[in-house]
Image (cartoon, rainbow, N blue to C red):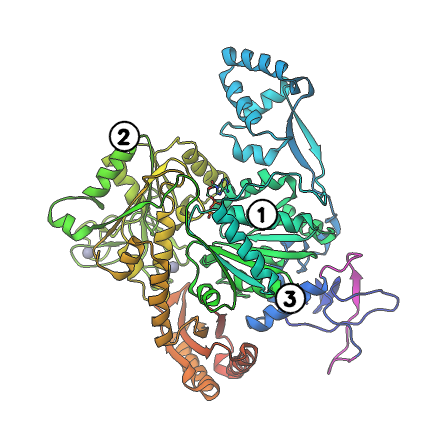
Amino acid sequence: MPLAQPAYTYAVPEGMELEVGDAVSVQFGLRKYYVGVVWRLHDTPPMAGRVKPILRRIYDHPLLDEQQRALWEWMAAYYICSLGEVMRCALPSLIKPSADSDSLLLQEEYHPRTERYYTLAEPYCHEEALHKCFDQFERRAPRLYATLAEVVHMLHQHMSEEVARRLLTADAAPLQQLVKKGVLELREHTPDVEYGTPAFRLPYLTPHQQQALDRLRSEFAAGRTAALLHGITGSGKTEIYIHLIAEVLARGGDVLLLVPEIALTAQLIERMERIFGSRVTAYHSRLTNQRRSESYLRLKRSSGGEFVVGVRSSIFLPLGHLQLILVDEEHDASYKQAEPAPRYSARDVAVWLAQRVSGHALLGSATPSLESWLNATSQKYGFSTLTERYGEAEPPTIYLSDTRRAAQRGERHGHFNKLLIDKIEQALSRNEQVMLFQNRRGFAPYLECPECGWIARCPHCNVTLSYHKYRAQLVCHYCGHTEHSATRCPSCKVVDLQPMGFGTEKVEEQIAELFPEARVARLDRDQLTSEQALNRIVDDFAAHKTDILVGTQMITKGFDFEAVSLVGVLNADNLLLNPDFRASERAFQLLQQVAGRAGRRRAGGEVVIQTSDPTNPLLRQVLNDDYSAMAHEQLAERKSYFYPPYARLTMLTVRHRDVQVVRRAAGELAIRLRRRFGERVLGPIAPPVDRIRGEYLMQLMVKIEAGKSRLRANQLLLEEVNALKQHPDFKQVIVAINVDPQ
Ligand code: ADP
Ligand code: ZN
Ligand code: ZN
């Protein structure tokens, strides 16, 4: 089974012991060698041709166990893709069977992960000696003093090198010096799992939190597989997770905590590491292949008690004792893989998997997806709520600020209303921090000629090129095409092009003009060049080395900064004007999440949302912090137009370089599908961006009643797609199938 291929049959040579799930190397074609996974052992010879023998068995254990094979098969059937496509996504690349990976696999030996950690050197474990050391440093080496103070403050028993690197505001140099001076020691050990008594203290829950936890426990005890925890930001959802996690680990079960974007939830991992120490396995794409493969193999051999914190692909990890899956920020769109196949939703897979292992899935969010909300309120899922913020923190005060009125009154500077400017000024004067949100990166979404109306467009996609000023480039956000930005209009050659609209770069530039003394940083995908770059921006903001953070969606997720008292949304309009049927739901979620960043630990947080449409009902719901009003209204709308969660969608995107071929193929596919699904088929239509990377796109949608068999519908659908591709004109046409598109 090479990459993304259907299964092939090979012969088992005399004397070779094989099990289902084994990794083996085989010859494919004349001179290619691949590594594959044994899927089925059988005696049926294939219809034609000679069967090549399997060359070698690679590991002495099967690579996949029964649970994983069941998961892969279900995913291939539910998301309409091949097992090979599931495999490509499920295995870390070093152990991934693929072309020419044989040599790699041979080198690939299992190394138990060793962890390096700092600890106080023995002589300094005594308070007196330590004090003396502090006294010395205080006078002569303030940097060492500060670092040591921080280490001691956070040191329970030991602190792993990784945690130290992320937690300490100091860089590595003072740590190294402390080691050299013999104050700290850097030791190595191989973390292993202790069973039984948890070696950590659990947080005491408030009565309100305790109630929510008890409710979840009783829902699970009553036999429900999944439950929704709807808790406003800062209410202590994570504290509840911690209790549930500790319980399962103490029993020797495995726990999987799914998080949306790992780099941005570094804080969450640290929090878990501080409690669960080296039991925590972080799993995300920013780790090296080596590390991910090691984690995979280590987990495979584990006898339970594992705690993985990871992004969506960690759903594939071999956790043989899985009992609990938590999906944090379950509404987050990044749980759905858009491209390539399998186009799966890790949240939905989590619920399936929990059911399969007779475990539990807990979905947590301040702004649940309407799918989960309906499941919870219709009692298909358990349901528990947290309605108060923990401690002193109170929900922020939200202001809607009318951009049109401000412009009429001359109270607008650049893209800032006076209200927002005043609030920023006040926050800065109180030495508090500010976050500014704009959901477009770059300087401006497009450049336009004021004379002839010429607009810079991508040569490969049907979209405008975004202007990135500091790089002096025009960039396509769909295909990555970049070109040097000309200033003079290339069409009429008369005047200079004007940037239209605005992105994060322009916000950053204007804020620097308005508040020249403030320290401003920007966080968006353009800054994601490396993990260090990203961490530096986040760490600097956390340490209050910057005052204002400008960013896209990224700043809405999971950040918990104490000193942020003000959040500004530069323009809510483009969130509301999106043509997607989920636009309102998404806008609400986003604005609530952004607002949740203000005043996390204290009262008096403020949020200013700028809009030209302050009477918009959705914005009123945000203003009143009224999730259930939003859900009620949106669900009524979804029901009457027959959209999810009342209908189940499958989107088919037909692609080809020739626009005529695409149109004909899509038309033909529509006719075929209507024969099977009748009125449930919508389209074909051209999507809003109907050309990407030189290929033209047409879309079809199939809507199926919730409750009808999905797998049966999938079969029919796949038959029609395959039949279409038999047509000589459409052999090269690509049909991408997206089940439950987001
Ligand atoms: P959520 O996950 O719902 O956003 P958190 O669990 O992050 O909320 O809690 C918000 C803040 O309040 C965190 O800093 C957390 O440490 C603190 N907190 C919440 N509940 C408790 C508790 N019972 N004891 C101590 N601190 C708590
Ligand atoms: Zn492009
Ligand atoms: Zn022009």
Q: Neighbour class for label 1 at 10 Å: few (<14), some, many (≥20)?
A: some
* Dot 3 or dot 1, earlier in sequence: 1
> Picture coordinates of residue 581 (x, y %)?
36, 68
> Picture coordinates of residue 169 (x, y %)?
49, 29
- The extreme right residue here reads 15
Circle 2 sits on which residue?
Answer: 429
Q: Secondary structure at mark 2?
A: helix
Circle 1 sits on which residue?
Answer: 243
* Residue contact between numbered discs 3 and 2, judged by CB atoms under 8 Å: no
User: How many angstroms separate mark 2 from mark 1 (CA)?
Assistant: 40 Å
Q: Is residue 77 visible?
A: yes
- Is 1 displayed left or right of 588 in the figure? right
- Is 346 displayed left or right of 539 in the figure? right
Circle 3 sits on which residue?
Answer: 356
* Dot 3 or dot 2, earlier in sequence: 3
Judge whether 214 appears above or below 168 on screen.
Answer: below
Tag in front: 2 or 1: 1
Bounds of the magenta segment: 44-64
Tag in front: 3 or 1: 1
Q: Is residue 689 visible?
A: no
User: How many angstroms separate mark 3 from mark 2 (CA)?
Assistant: 56 Å
The residue under the point 40% across, 73% down is: 643
> Picture coordinates of residue 374 (x, y %)?
44, 67
- The extreme bottom residue here reads 675
- Is 603 displayed left or right of 125 in the figure? left
Q: Amino acid at mark 3?
A: Arg
* Dot 2 or dot 1, earlier in sequence: 1
